[in-house]
Amino acid sequence: MTHHPSRRSVLLGGAAAAAGLTVLGAPALAAPSRRLADPFTLGLASGDPSPEGFVLWTRLATEPLALDGRGGMPDRAVPVLWQVATDERFRHVVRSGVEIARPESAHSVHVEVAGLRPDAEYFYRFRVQGHLTETGRTRTAPAPGTMGAPLTMCFASCSHFGAGYFTAYRRLAEDDPGLVLHLGDYQYEYAARANEVREIVGPETRTLADYRLRHAQYKTDADLQLAHRVAPWLVVWDDHETENNWADEVPEQPDPAFLDRRAAAFQAYYENMPLRRTARPRGIDMRLYRRIGWGALANFHMLDTRQYRDDQACGDGTRVGCEERLDPTRTITGVEQEQWLADGLRRSRARWDVLGQQVFFAQRDLRVGPAEGFSMDGWDGYKANRDRVAGLLGQTRNAVVLTGDVHRHWAGEVLETWDRPDSRRVATELVATSVTSGGDGDDSDNAAVLAENPHLKFYSNRRGYVRTRFSASEMRADFRTLAAVRTPDAPATTAATFVVADRQPELHRV
């Protein structure tokens, strides 16, 4: 029987064992020239699970809010010891070693652990000198072709530090997920603004030092650290990890230094996320789209809808009568990524094919009445690209699109033909509201827009996240909401629950 320790023992019990940590087979290490203060202020994380392993991450920072982005660390390499065990007390260590945290990588560490059992729970930790991280919990994916147990997966997006408290991350962690997806806007580039709940440190992010500092401030948040400790994450970015509404090499506003800014943002993103070496940026390019298999149950196709897109049509925003959006050559994925997705969907034998991506996929007419108004930043601004992907989704057994970006909960059905409300359903779409962006929100129902779009079944203007449970027979989605984020520690409630049955791409409200 799998051992399921208490959440408290897993998340709070690691630091007491620092004195007893030894790493099997670790090389002898020279004594450091100067003893560090606690370097684990940014926590730890795991990500990108495979049937035989996962990525472990930490970043050393004795002074996380140092304005130079170096985290108070010396200009020298620091050896970091790591362990993976089958039990929370680390009596049964199965992998261990030493990684070198280097100043040119902001003293970040990415450990790619392999050779483990599939579909198994593991515990991990790091040590530098006498300092030990708290214990993290992670897991491997089921073996290919193995259905395994149902998977609880939570997903979230849009966490602005200044807009409120990250209580949604804590509530997400308390749901004990086996996997977490973050769909973008993990951090925001803006400088501090008036009337914010929490103070942003540093200017608007433009340089590598700026982005490193901003990521560090976010990672000091205890609720975010907790969410990273309980499960492996799959992360993709949206716009604010670099700047608002950027599109490939086109910034929001004219900026001759934008490509330097983009390269800095990409490097800092990699340094601060549990990503494999295949995602290491090369200048202004970073391969973030990838596919994670979860046995025979699910394939997670993680997309990048920023780096390869054409500039937004008709000057961005919500537009009426924008013919440019109908251009069949316009792309939000880029040709290569679209072909990669098409190949993966055609070859898939998974029960569920899940797209983890950033912006609204289904058609969404935001104007009430005969005139149609569409957001040019979402897939509506790239109609031909969207319709080709929708056609591919219709060829799978079950397809679910997961979305962030819009700071609202939505649930909808993806139609084969948008101008026919009775058209065949080819997939469902679940849109997560923000963690904090937009503040507390309200209880407005947006009834007029829902009536304008009968394929959209649910809307909520509260903050929170979405909890899903995938099994062989159905996918269940709970839209979790918080009454407030401008005050800490609000409870989470379920605003709506939908079920999608196997081979029936329709939302049934419970």
Image: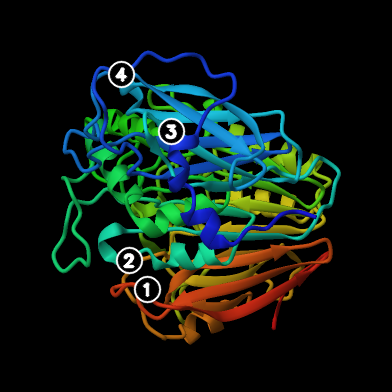
Which one is in front, 311 or 80? Answer: 80
- Residue 489, disc: 1
Residues at discs 2 and 1 in contact (Cβ within 8 Å): yes
Q: CA distance from mark 1 to mark 4?
A: 41 Å
**38 relative position to 377: left or right:** left
Q: Earlier in the sequence, mark 1 or mark 4?
A: 4
Q: CA distance from mark 4 to mark 3?
A: 14 Å
Near mark 4 (Cα within 10 A), the count class, few <14, some 14-19 or many ≥20, is: few
SS for dot 1? loop
At label 3, which amino acid type do we have? Arg
Q: Which residue is mark 4?
A: 32
Q: Earlier in the sequence, mark 3 or mark 1?
A: 3
SS for dot 2? loop
**149 relative position to 135: left or right:** right
* Residue 44: % across, % down: 45, 43
Task: Give the residue at x 39% y 63%.
Answer: 319
* Residue 184: % across, % down: 45, 51
- Residue 127, disc: 3
Q: Earlier in the sequence, mark 3 or mark 2?
A: 3
Residues at discs 3 and 1 in contact (Cβ within 8 Å): no
